Image (cartoon, coloured by chain):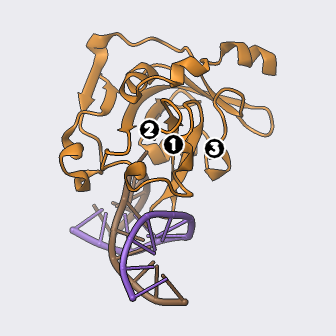
Chain colours: A orange, B brown, C purple
Amino acid sequence: MVSGSRLRRLPASFYRRPTLVVARDLLGRTLCRTLPDGTVLRGNLVEVEAYDGPKDRASHAFRGLTARNRWMFEPGGLAYVYLVYGMHHCLNVVTGEAGYPAAVLLRGATSPNGASASGPGRLTRAFDVDRRLDGTSFLSGPMWLEAGEPVPDRAVRRTRRIGVDYAGSWASRHFRFVIAK
DNA sequence: GGTGCGATTGCA
DNA sequence: GCAATCGCACCA
């Protein structure tokens, strides 16, 4: 069972590429999460946002390494989970090479029951993700990604990121990727 | 040690 | 339009 899912996991090389490339490639991939009781939740990603490097003013890594954002500086393949507004968790996929802080925020997916989880807080709730998963590996942990349904370029729309208007010129960059309806 | 606010959501 | 709710980044 574990070995079976292991074979389907996307490999380290998937994550250790430029953040924008990974973000685009995450669309349509299947997010999987095993619960303590053995249940496996699955859903395909439909909306993500890239946070790219130490100069990205919208990124938590903009002010350098801290206890919270430390996983962003690790090699791609880890989960970075944090709490916002004191109540909602946000799940990120750490990307790129060691020392270069980057991650992709997962903002929307088809949820386990077939409905949709639209919004980062709703996504983490649907997949029972909280800070216990912070720093866990997508390569070996209780949460991982599988190939899913590849999305053609014509179905991909790019926009500015949500909720980062404070980020100056970085706010207007089209780092958000969604599957067009 | 104190403070201001956020990569959001749900409800009036 | 705005309250909820708390960890954390920053200043003293």
Q: Earlier in the sequence, mark 1 or mark 2?
A: 1
* Parent chain of label 2: A
Could you classify mark 1 by the number of other residues whose Cα lies within 10 Å: few (under 14), some (14-19), or many (20 or more)?
A: many
**What residue type is disc 1 on?**
Met
Q: Which mark is residue A72?
A: 1
Determine which residue is flagged by label 2: A102
Label 1 residue SS? helix
Distance between the Cα atoms at labels 1 and 2? 5 Å
**What residue type is disc 3 on?**
Gly
Please tell me if label 1 and label 2 are on a single chain: yes
Q: Earlier in the sequence, mark 1 or mark 3?
A: 1
Could you classify mark 2 by the number of other residues whose Cα lies within 10 Å: few (under 14), some (14-19), or many (20 or more)?
A: many
* Parent chain of label 1: A
**What residue type is disc 2 on?**
Ala
Distance between the Cα atoms at labels 1 and 3? 9 Å
* Parent chain of label 3: A
Q: Which mark is residue A135?
A: 3
The quarter of the picture where residue A155 lies is top left
Q: Nearer the viewer, mark 3 or mark 2?
A: 2
